[in-house]
Amino acid sequence: MNGTERKNIIPGRTVDIVLKKDQRTGQLTRGIVKDILTNSPSHPHGIKVRLEDGQVGRVKTVHL
């Protein structure tokens, strides 16, 4: 599922994110959503989230 829509992302769901340091390479990091940091209903680069391990990035893929 696409990570640009806030409605697709809920705490506890597994996602792939791009960390700020990995934006050039596009390397994905998998984790579980702890907090949703973007307030708007959508964002073209992905909704920003904090994972349970504390890493922050923009969601590229949502796993069901």
Image (tube, rainbow, N blue to C red):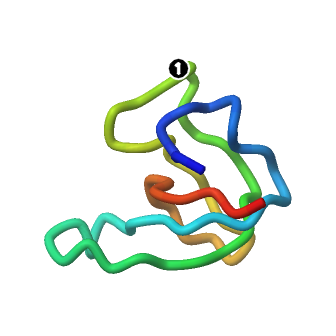
Query: Is 24 placed above or below 64 here?
Result: below
Instruction: Pick out the residue farthest to the left.
Output: 24
> How many numbered discs sit on the rendered protein?
1
**Residue at the spot 63% in from the left edge and 71% down from the top edge:** 54
Q: Residues within 10 Å of mark 1 (few under 14, many from 20)?
A: few
* Residue at image location 72% in from the left, 49% down from the top: 35
Q: Residue furthest top?
A: 40
From the viewer's side, name the closer residue of 3 and 56: 3
- At x 66%, y 75%, the residue is 31
- In percent of width and height, residue 36 lies at 66, 42
Point out residue 12 in the picture as x, y percentages from the top left corner: 85, 59
Q: Judge by depth and name the residue closer to the eye, 15 or 22.
A: 15
* Quadrant of the frame with the C terminus: bottom right
Horizontal arrangement in the rendering, residue 58 relative to residue 11 (left or right): left
Q: Circle 1 sits in a helix, a strand or a loop, which is it?
A: loop
Q: Position of residue 4 (x, y in %)?
A: 47, 37
Instruction: Locate residue 53 relative to residue 64 in the image: left or right.
Output: left
Q: Which residue is mark 1?
A: 40
Residue found 70% across the figure and 43% down from its top:
9
Q: Amino acid at mark 1?
A: Ser
On screen, residue 56 above or below 5: below
Q: Is residue 14 above or below residue 11?
A: below
13 relative to 30, above or below? above
Q: Which residue appears farthest toward the right when viewing the image? A: 12
**Residue 13 in the image, given as x and y percentages of width and height:** 79, 59
Q: Is residue 8 left or right of residue 43?
A: right
